[in-house]
Image (cartoon, rainbow, N blue to C red):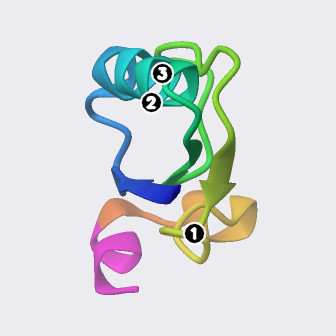
Amino acid sequence: MRIALVDPSLFTVPYDEALTHALQALGHAVVVHGRRPRRDDNAVNGIPLETSFYRLTAWPPLCALPKPLRLGA
C-alpha cells in the first residue's frame, strides 16, 4: 500500500521516522510530506521526504525580509 505521512512543519521528525520505518518493514511504500529541513532541525535519516509545504516562505530572499513582512507573505 502507498502511504502519505503529512507533517507540514516537521515538528515530529523522530515519530515520523519511527512510523515510516515500521510501515516500510510491513511492506508499505511511505512518503513523508513536509517542508525542507533546516540546519537546526532534527536529522531526517533515511526517510523519503517530499518538500510539499512552505516553499515560498523558505525561499532565501524572502527569509531575509523583516519578520512582519515574512508573516504577511
- The image position of residue 22, as x and y in percent, is 42, 18
**Quarter of the image that includes the C terminus:** bottom left
Q: Which residue is mark 2?
A: 23
Question: Which residue type does callout 1 highlight?
Answer: Ser
Q: Is residue 70 magenta?
A: yes
Q: Toward which corner of the image does residue 27 lie, by quadrant?
A: top right
Q: Secondary structure at mark 2?
A: helix
**Magenta segment range?**
68-73
Residue positioned 57% across, 59% down in the render: 63
Secondary-structure class at tag 3: loop
Residue topped by disc 1: 52
Q: Gap in Å between the C-alphas at discs 1 and 3?
A: 17 Å
Give the foreground label among 1 and 3: 1
Residue occupying the point 29% across, 74% down: 71
Direction from residue 49 to residue 26 in the image, left or right: left
Closer to viewer: mark 3 or mark 2: 2
The disc label shown at residue 41, or none: 3
